[in-house]
């Protein structure tokens, strides 16, 4: 029997994500968007004790960082983030800690401590050095077990500036020509860099990738990243957990309600009797409602004799 949204919450409690990426990769902005806030996160140690910002800053200044620390935003405490800060420097000790953390948290029997996804941020304002020693090591040596890794190409709009600069040097192009050709040139720059292709050829390739641009703008969101993560999760209970945790993407709820529940009932009706009994209609409504954990709904009964076309 499928777990309800409440059952999933009680079993896993929170959706836990490891965020990897060099300094200035846009990680903080990304997490703020996901949690719909502009405030900084609260930081807790591995035992749940709150750590002051001054203590964290002092540790970072000394080159120390504990990947076990939890980052939680007050706007959405259902998400717990771990920051890889420090591993990108490539020191042997940092690489060892990263590998141990991923190995332990990917398979721990303590479900509420298990990481459910990894977001690897690669900024496109440094597209010429998108794959450094850190990326090569991670995707070659770090086995994430069944935890999906999503590569997040942050600051993707930076490639537009590169493309504009190149096109402006092309003789005979009008401003309109440059504007119209920029998207195509951006795609060419990205494809020619072969970043995704190189990552896919590693021993432990990522599961998917997304491009995020202009994340500093109010009108942008992390819908593509949430959708990608949702698709990469192989467990429906974890998909339900992500749905019940995120509070900013109604479209994600609608898509999964239709694809994973409504269409299944319609298909079953078409393959057998087209008549939907009243109790089956109520069951379908309840399962659809599970994809909308943050909304209230009144019950609508499907009269007996109703046919699904």
Image (cartoon, helix red, strand yellow):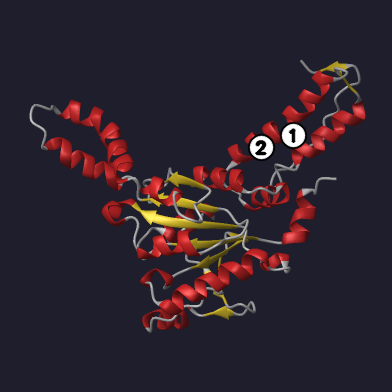
Of 281 and 208, the residue lying toward us: 208
Look at the numbered disc 2 and give the secondary structure of its residue.
Answer: helix
Name the residue beneath numbered marker 2.
Answer: 256
Residue 18 position (above or below residue 4): below
Of 305 and 127, the residue lying toward us: 127
Residue 176 position (above or below residue 131): above
Would you say residue 297 is visible in this rendering? no
Name the residue beneath numbered marker 1.
Answer: 261
> Which quadrant, please, contains the C terminus?
top right
Percent position of residue 54, x then y:
44, 81
- Left or right? Give the position of 292 relative to 150: right
Of 6 and 126, the residue lying toward us: 126
Would you say residue 14 is visible in this rendering? yes
Percent position of residue 298, x then y:
80, 36
The numbered dot on residue 242 is: none
Look at the numbered disc 1 and give the secondary structure of its residue.
Answer: helix
């Amino acid at each position: 029997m499928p777990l309800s949204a409440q059952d999933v919450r009680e079993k896993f409690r929170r959706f836990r994500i490891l965020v990897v990426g060099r300094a200035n990769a846009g990680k903080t902005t990304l997490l703020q968007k996901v949690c719909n806030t502009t405030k900084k996160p609260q930081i807790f140690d591995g035992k749940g004790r709150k750590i002051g910002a001054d203590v964290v800053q002092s540790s970072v200044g000394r080159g120390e960082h504990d990947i076990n620390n939890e980052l939680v935003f007050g706007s959405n405490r259902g998400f717990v983030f771990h920051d890889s800060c420090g591993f990108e420097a490539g020191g042997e000790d940092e690489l060892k800690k990263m590998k141990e953390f991923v190995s332990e948290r990917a398979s721990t029997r303590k479900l509420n401590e298990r990481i459910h996804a990894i977001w690897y941020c690669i900024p496109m304002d440094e597209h010429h050095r998108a794959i450094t020693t850190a990326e090569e090591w991670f995707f070659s040596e770090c086995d994430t077990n069944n935890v999906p890794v999503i590569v997040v190409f942050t600051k993707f709009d930076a490639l537009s500036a590169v493309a504009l600069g190149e096109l402006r040097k092309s003789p005979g192009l009008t401003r309109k020509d440059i504007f119209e050709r920029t998207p195509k040139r951006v795609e060419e720059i990205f494809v020619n860099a072969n970043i995704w292709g190189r990552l896919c050829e590693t021993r432990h390739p990522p599961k998917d990738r997304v491009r995020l641009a202009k994340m500093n703008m109010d009108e942008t969101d992390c819908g593509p990243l949430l959708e990608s993560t949702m698709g990469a999760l192989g467990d429906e209970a974890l998909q339900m957990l992500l749905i019940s945790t995120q509070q900013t993407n109604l479209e994600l709820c609608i898509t999964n309600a239709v694809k994973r529940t409504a269409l299944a009932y319609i298909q079953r009706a078409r393959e057998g009797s087209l008549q939907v009994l009243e109790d089956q209609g109520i069951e379908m409504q309840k399962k659809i409602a599970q994809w909308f954990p943050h909304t209230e709904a009144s019950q609508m009964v499907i009269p007996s004799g109703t046919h699904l076309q």
